[in-house]
């Protein structure tokens, strides 16, 4: 299960549904989850100006509504157990999965705080020309219940440059952030890698130095890299050894540059 550990940076290899029940109850301040979107349907998309398959892997292929929802509900429930009373969870998605995510959260008693629209100014074009170009993803931010207090670094977010308005104004729920640049993929690529700026806002907004951040779908480790750079502790869970090794290389590169 333990794949890598260096000080307060930990990577666990395996299935989140099997690992999360073994983690300490109510130990995590902030969870960011980038689960499968279930959009690998043998279609096409545009990448770097070229037509490519939309398929990302069997892990991203829908198994049907009922089975997809059961998976979504179960992993969110497992995250609920390890989340502190005043902790919060952020979950990203598109129209393919985000409505199941929202329903599962509310079914489990979570209270939704915000629906963030991550606007991608450099989103690829829609090759079919039969509907609007997909140029955003949704990130739902929720706390364990309506009655619990939650951590929000309001002043910091107010001063953050969100590229949609002058600094000193309240940050809005539309975030203008370009797609992950090649400079953040030097150690290897993941098909759904999130940009550092997106995770920087999420972690800075909802945690403080020393808090524990969890990502149950670690991927290539952006959540962990940002957590480490902001002085947070980190635990990432990932099945694929390839992506765990990319995360380790990114972690080593970050620490070598300090």
Image (tube, rainbow, N blue to C red):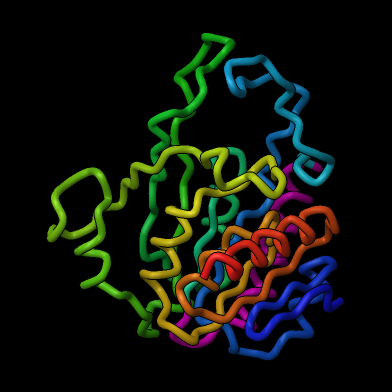
Q: Does the magenta stretch include residue 68?
A: yes
Residue located 77% across and 55% down the image: 243
Residue located 74% across and 23% down the image: 53
Dominant secondary-structure state across the stretch colored magenta:
helix
Residue 41 picture quarter: top right
Counting from the top left corner in percent of width and height, residue 182 is at 57, 38
Counting from the top left corner in percent of width and height, residue 92 is at 54, 52
Q: Is residue 21 magenta?
A: no
Q: 114 or 255, which lies in front?
A: 255
Using the rendered image of the protein, determine whether residue 106 is visible from the camera's viewpoint: no
Residue located 27% across and 65% down the image: 157
Left or right, residue 86 beside residue 37? left
Magenta region, residue range: 63-87
Q: Relative to 187, does residue 207 appear above or below in the rendering?
A: below
Residue located 53% across and 10% down the image: 130
Quarter of the figure with the N terminus:
bottom right
Left or right, residue 39 beside residue 135? right
Left or right, residue 82 beside residue 71? left
């Amino acid at each position: 299960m333990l794949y890598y550990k260096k000080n307060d940076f930990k990577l666990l290899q395996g299935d989140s549904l099997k690992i999360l029940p073994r983690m300490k109850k109510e130990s995590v301040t902030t969870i960011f989850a980038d689960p499968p979107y279930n959009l690998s349907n043998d279609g096409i998309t545009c990448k770097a100006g070229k037509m490519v398959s939309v398929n990302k892997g069997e892990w991203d292929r829908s198994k049907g509504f009922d089975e997809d929802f059961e998976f979504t509900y179960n992993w969110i429930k497992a995250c609920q157990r390890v989340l502190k009373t005043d902790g919060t969870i952020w979950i990203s998605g598109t129209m393919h999965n985000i409505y199941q995510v929202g329903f599962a959260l509310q079914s489990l008693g979570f209270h939704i705080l915000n629906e963030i629209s991550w606007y991608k100014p450099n989103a690829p074009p829609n090759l079919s020309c039969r509907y609007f170009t997909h140029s955003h993803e949704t990130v739902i931010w929720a706390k364990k219940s309506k009655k619990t207090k939650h951590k929000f670094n309001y002043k910091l977010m107010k001063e953050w440059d969100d590229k949609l308005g002058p600094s000193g104004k309240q940050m809005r729920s539309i975030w203008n952030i370009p797609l992950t640049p090649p400079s953040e993929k030097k150690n290897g690529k993941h098909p759904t890698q999130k940009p550092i700026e997106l995770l920087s806002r999420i972690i800075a907004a909802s945690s403080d130095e020393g808090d524990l951040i969890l990502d149950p779908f670690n991927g290539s480790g952006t959540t962990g890299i940002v957590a480490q750079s902001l002085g947070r502790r980190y635990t990432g869970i990932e099945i694929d050894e390839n992506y765990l090794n990319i995360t380790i290389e990114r972690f080593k590169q970050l620490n070598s540059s300090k």
